[in-house]
Image (cartoon, helix red, strand yellow):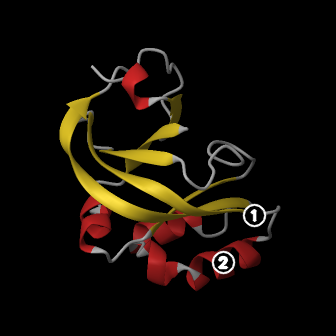
């Protein structure tokens, strides 16, 4: 399964993936929302910066996935702190994710830069930061 994943441009997430200082991405919410339970080892993630460029710039293979059970604020914060060495979150990102009831941690391998390409998001009315696209060719422009 292929996924299009938006990264925080202000926090230089893409650059951190390229230089190896970030090897894991995080998503979290009050409820179980995407990508909770929908991403698996071996899936391919295609990365776009969330700065309206709208182009895929890199990809990686999912190496590991952790979907948390419902957690307290303290448990959630402790989980994010425990993985901060791989997440390399900025202060604002840490505040955004730590404390969420449900956390998804996704370990990455084989991170590679791609020749940039645009995607067609018209089939995704709910513009979230995670699009399960099945096959990347189905959304390539």
Image location of residue 68, percent across then percent down: 75, 63
Residue at 49% x, 38% y is 2
Left or right relative to 7: residue 25: right
The residue that disc 2 covers is 79
Q: Which residue is more in the foreground, 35 or 101?
A: 35
User: Mark 2 vs mark 1: which is more N-terminal?
Assistant: 1
Instruction: Choose between 89 and 47: the one closer to the eye.
Output: 47
Q: Nearest the camera: 132 or 12?
A: 132
Number of numbered discs on residues? 2
Residues tagged 2 and 1 counted as in contact (Cβ below 8 A): yes
- Quarter where residue 35 is shown: top right
**Residue at horizontal 75 percent and vertical 48 percent from the top:** 31
Query: Looking at the figure, which quarter contains the C terminus?
Result: top left
Is 140 situated left or right of 125 in this image?
left
> In front here: 65 or 93?
65
SS label for mark 2: helix
Q: Is residue 77 left or right of residue 69?
A: left
Please provide percent x and percent y for residue 51. Answer: 26, 42
Q: Which residue is mark 1?
A: 68
Quarter of the rendering containing residue 83? bottom right
Give coordinates of residue 130: x percent, y percent. Answer: 51, 40
Task: Name which residue lies at 72% across and 52% down.
Answer: 30
For the point 80% across and 67% down, which residue is it? Answer: 71
105 shown above or below 120: below
In the rendered view, tell whether residue 125 sits above or below residue 33: above
Which type of secondary structure does the marked residue at label 1 adopt?
A: loop
């Amino acid at each position: 399964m292929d996924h299009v994943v938006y990264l925080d441009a202000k926090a230089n997430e893409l650059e951190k993936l390229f230089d190896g200082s970030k090897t894991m991405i995080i998503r979290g919410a009050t409820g179980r929302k995407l990508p909770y339970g929908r991403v698996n080892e071996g899936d391919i993630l295609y990365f776009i910066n969330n700065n309206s460029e709208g182009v895929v710039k890199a990809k990686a293979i999912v190496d590991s996935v952790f979907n948390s059970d419902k957690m307290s604020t303290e448990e959630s914060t402790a989980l994010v702190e425990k993985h901060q060495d791989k997440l390399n979150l900025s202060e604002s990102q840490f505040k955004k994710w730590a404390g969420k009831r449900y956390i998804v941690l996704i370990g990455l391998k084989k991170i590679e830069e791609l020749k940039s390409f645009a995607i067609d998001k018209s089939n995704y009315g709910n513009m979230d930061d995670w699009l399960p696209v099945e096959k990347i060719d189905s959304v390539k422009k």
